[in-house]
Image (tube, rainbow, N blue to C red):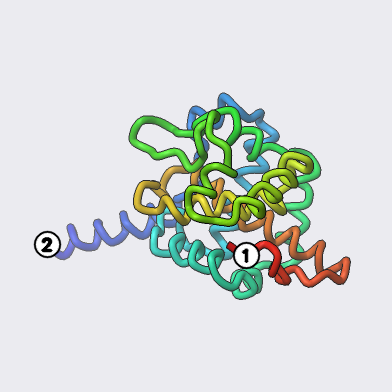
Amino acid sequence: MRFIVLLFLILLVSCSKKEQKFIPSQEMKSIYNQEELADIQTLVELFNSRVCESQNDLSCYRGVLRDIDGDMCVLFEMFDDTVSDKVGDFISKHPNVIWSECRSTLYAVNQDYQSPCISPETKFASYLSNLNNDLKIVKTMEKELDESGFLDINWWLSEYYILTELNRSDLRNPNINFFIAIGVLGGYYDYQLQLELGVDYFDTSDLRF
């Protein structure tokens, strides 16, 4: 009898892992249309399949965030042209979907989740300057982001913010999963563009903290 119960539990766990998919929260459904949600689901599941076995694997996400904070070349080796194409398609259709959302809402699913975004009345520049960063550099980054609204700056700021909030962020939150995924994939897409242009993407001596 114990063997049967144990076998049942093993099967239940293994099946539940296989069935784990990105499920948008009600808040995301109220913000994005069906086409955008389909794109978001594709990107997050693509990210999870290349980097994480499960979007609930917290150790994996923390490892990814450590790579972001350090050498992203290692992380980018996990991706290929398929990823770049899908991210490129998403960016071309919804270039400001993340940043505009971050500026207009706390982006929290409910009271149990911490928001990965700064509150609307708080600017990235003032937040980062409070971390003893060079205010001139931060303002330059913010200015570029305001002018472009593109992910080349967005992923850098968003991932840095999440890195500082790990103890307060629930990485099982589908919104945060999405935020991390699109940040990394957006960075990869921009990295590919820089390579095509012959630019040294990692020459960031003027953007160091």
Residue at the (74%, 59%) spot, across then down = 189
The residue pinned by badge 1 equals: 208
- The amino acid type, in three-letter code, at marker 2 is Arg
In the shown orientation, is residue 138 left or right of residue 15? right
Q: Is residue 86 visible?
A: yes
Q: Is residue 46 visible?
A: no
Q: Which one is nearer the viewer's eye here, 48 or 127?
A: 127
The residue pinned by badge 2 equals: 2
Instruction: Identify the image quadrant of residue 109.
Output: top left
In the shown orientation, is residue 42 left or right of residue 55? right
- The image position of residue 28, as x and y in percent, is 55, 32
In the shown orientation, is residue 98 left or right of residue 164? right
Disc number lying in front (1 or 2): 1
Q: For mark 1, give the secondary structure.
A: loop
Q: For mark 2, give the secondary structure.
A: helix
Residue at the (64%, 73%) spot, across then down = 73
The first of marks 1 and 2 along the sequence is 2
**The N terminus sits in image quarter:** bottom left
Q: Which one is nearer the viewer's eye here, 149 or 36?
A: 149
- The image position of residue 128, as x and y in percent, is 53, 49
